């Protein structure tokens, strides 16, 4: 299966957290990993924000960049932005969540999405994306 990764899940992988095992297991069993351009930027910025010092930030972002190098990065272009308007309007999502899902909607199924972001979960299920999360939907 292709596994799409949302920053909310990836932060667990790099910074640790109660759901890191779920994320790591999902990544270990996936055939391929994908991330949108927007999610990549969001992740790297979040790791800097949550780091207590520059050394920790450098360590966390280096780990994230190593994984990102192994991922397919989905571009955010006019096609994705147009689809984001449709998805965001239909499911009442924030722009950032709609853009993430619009980028992923280009991919063949079966497709999984590792996320802890409840705003994305029901919309992803409606788009026939399997949600990988420790949170009840």
Image (spheres, helix red, strand yellow):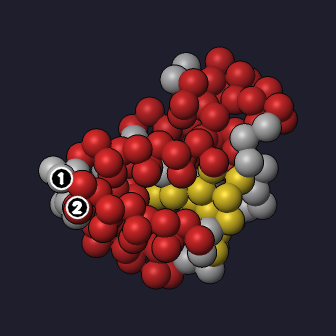
Along the viewing direction, whichever of 64 and 92 lies nearer the viewer = 64
Whether residue 57 sits left or right of residue 77 in the image: it is left
Farthest front residue? Answer: 54
Q: In the structure shown, which secondary structural element does the residue marked by tag 1 occupy?
A: loop
Q: Residue 85 at x, y = what percent?
A: 71, 22
- Judge the density around disc 1: few (<14), some (14-19), many (≥20) Cα neighbours within 10 Å: few
Q: CA–CA distance between discs 2 and 1?
A: 6 Å
Q: In the structure shown, which secondary structural element does the residue marked by tag 2 occupy?
A: helix
Q: Residue 39 at x, y = what percent?
A: 54, 47
Q: Quadrant of the C terminus?
A: top left
> In this picture, is 125 found above or below 107?
above
Whether residue 136 sits left or right of residue 32 in the image: it is left
Q: Which mark is residue 53?
A: 1
Q: For mark 2, what is the residue?
A: 56
What residue is drawn where x is 70% and y is 45%? 103
- Which quadrant holds residue 79? top right
What residue is drawn where x is 52% and y is 23%? 94
Q: Residue 133 at x, y = what percent?
A: 38, 56
- Which quadrant holds residue 26? bottom left
Q: Residue 129 at x, y = what percent?
A: 62, 52
What residue is drawn where x is 46% and y is 81%? 28
Disc 2 vs disc 1: Cβ atoms closer than 8 Å?
A: yes
Q: Quadrant of the N terminus?
A: bottom right
């Amino acid at each position: 299966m292709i596994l799409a990764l949302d920053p909310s899940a990836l932060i667990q992988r790099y910074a640790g957290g109660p759901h890191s095992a779920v994320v790591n297991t999902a990544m270990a069993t996936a055939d391929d990993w994908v991330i949108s351009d927007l999610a990549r930027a969001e992740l790297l910025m979040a790791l800097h924000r949550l780091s207590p010092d520059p050394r920790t930030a450098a360590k966390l972002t280096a780990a994230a960049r190593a994984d990102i190098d192994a991922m397919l990065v989905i571009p955010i272009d006019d096609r994705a932005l147009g689809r984001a308007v449709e998805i965001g309007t239909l499911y009442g999502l924030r722009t950032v969540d709609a853009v993430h899902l619009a980028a992923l909607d280009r991919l063949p199924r079966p497709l999984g999405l590792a996320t802890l972001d409840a705003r994305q979960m029901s919309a992803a299920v409606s788009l026939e994306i399997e949600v990988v999360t420790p949170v009840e939907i």
